[in-house]
Image: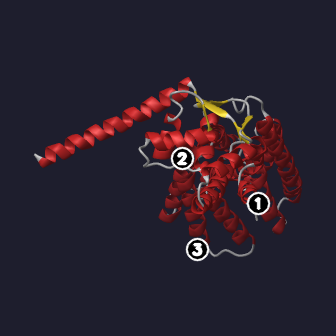
Amino acid sequence: MDFRPPSYFALAALIDGPLHGYAIMRRAGELSGGTVRVSTGTLYALLERALAEGLVSSGEPYTLGGRTRRDYALTNDGREALAAAAQRLAHAATTVTARLAASAA
Amino acid sequence: MTRERLVRAALRAWPADVRAERGSEIADTLLEASDSRSRFARELAALAWRGLGARAGAPGIASAVLLDGVRLAGGLYSVLLLAALVRVVSFPQAPQFDTQLALLAASCALAIAGRDRWAGVGLVAIALWRGLATPLVGVSWFVVSCEIALGLVMIASGRPSRPRRELLLAAAVLIPLAMIHRPAPLEEGVAVLALASLLTLAGDPRPAIACAVIALVVGAAMAAVSQDPKVAAVLLILAPLTLVAATVRARAGARAVATSPGRRR
């Protein structure tokens, strides 16, 4: 799966446990420091793909405060995919930081 | 129009199975996230846009299966055309003919490798080259136009599925071998292919769709010039029947995927 910032932070929102759709959107915004705002369309398109690829599992729907909810949880495959994406990003950041430091010296 | 109605309208862009399973959940999430009028407008636009994207890329949707079958027809047609041209060539040929064969072989290789877009560019280039290099009239223009159409579908296509590549690879080996073993006109080969495609209907409908598309093109071209009327009749009867059966099969498959209890887990 292609991990662009909204997808990356939306899946990262599930690291600490299952969340429903709106909670994922809020948590993704918090984790990104407010730089990423996941829209409802982006979130559910991501969840559809992640469910199909087995990165996320979904629970049964329920009603809370008059709204239909459903909790989503990260699977082991999802954790591994997220860890691999984090490593790629960390490696890319380290490489660029080192090159910038070397060229400035 | 109320916000709820606008959200329901935007949800129409999503595949039917997603709407049925998550429609109310998506709508409630969107309404909760829309804390201002401008945010609501952005959310609504994103929902419709992402829905169209999900619809285009949804696996098991009948239209996607049909489109994949037509893409496969482009690859299969390239293999058939290459085998037919190589069989009638008496070397040495004119340099431009050799170049056309090389281009067609490259197009086949690209289709087998899953590079549909580039394979389609090759097929369109060959068709245009043949159309411009030799004086074409009547039925020839029809065939060349169909080749260009198949190539354009391949250019507009996405990533092919694995079974397609395996089938194309098998076709690339078996069709030339069969033609060398028993030299027969291309039309007879297509008729055999059309009959064989009926056998695949029970499983994956895409090979059947591909064969039916090719059979329709070749059958119509043959009928136009009254060539082998019996073979042409077989092709023109089998092809539409196969297409109808394959469409029914694709829709049944899409329904089975949509209602599969294991899909969402």
Disc marking residue B109: 2
Q: Secondary structure at mark 1?
A: helix
Disc 3 residue type (three-letter): Leu
Which marked residue is nearer to the observer: mark 1 or mark 3?
1
Q: Secondary structure at mark 2?
A: helix
Nearer-N-terminus badge (2/3):
2
- In this picture, residue B156 sits left or right of residue B207: left
Tell me where residue B100 appears, x and y as whole percent. 53, 60
Which picture quadrant has residue A72?
A: top right
Please report contact status of discs 1 and 3: CB closer than 8 Å, yes or no: no
Please report contact status of discs 2 and 1: CB closer than 8 Å, yes or no: no
Disc marking residue B132: 3
Nearer-N-terminus badge (2/1):
2
Disc 2 residue type (three-letter): Ala
- In this picture, residue B164 sits left or right of residue B208: left
The numbered mark 1 sits on a residue in which chain? B
Q: Nearer the viewer, residue B233 or B58?
A: B58
Q: Quick check: B59 above or below B222?
A: above
The numbered mark 3 sits on a residue in which chain? B
Tell me where residue B101 appears, x and y as whole percent. 54, 56
Alpha-carbon distance for marks 2 and 3?
24 Å
Disc marking residue B217: 1
Alpha-carbon distance for marks 1 and 3?
20 Å
Q: Quadrant of the C terminus of chain B?
A: top right
Question: For mark 3, does the 10 Å Cα neighbourhood hold few (<14), some (14 to 19), or many (20 or more) residues?
Answer: few
Q: Quadrant of the N terminus of chain B?
A: bottom right
Nearer-N-terminus badge (1/3):
3
Q: Nearer the viewer, residue A2 or B242?
A: A2
Q: Looking at the image, which residue is at 74% across and 46% down?
A: B23
Disc 1 residue type (three-letter): Val
Tell me where residue B87 appears, x and y as whole percent. 63, 51
The numbered mark 2 sits on a residue in which chain? B
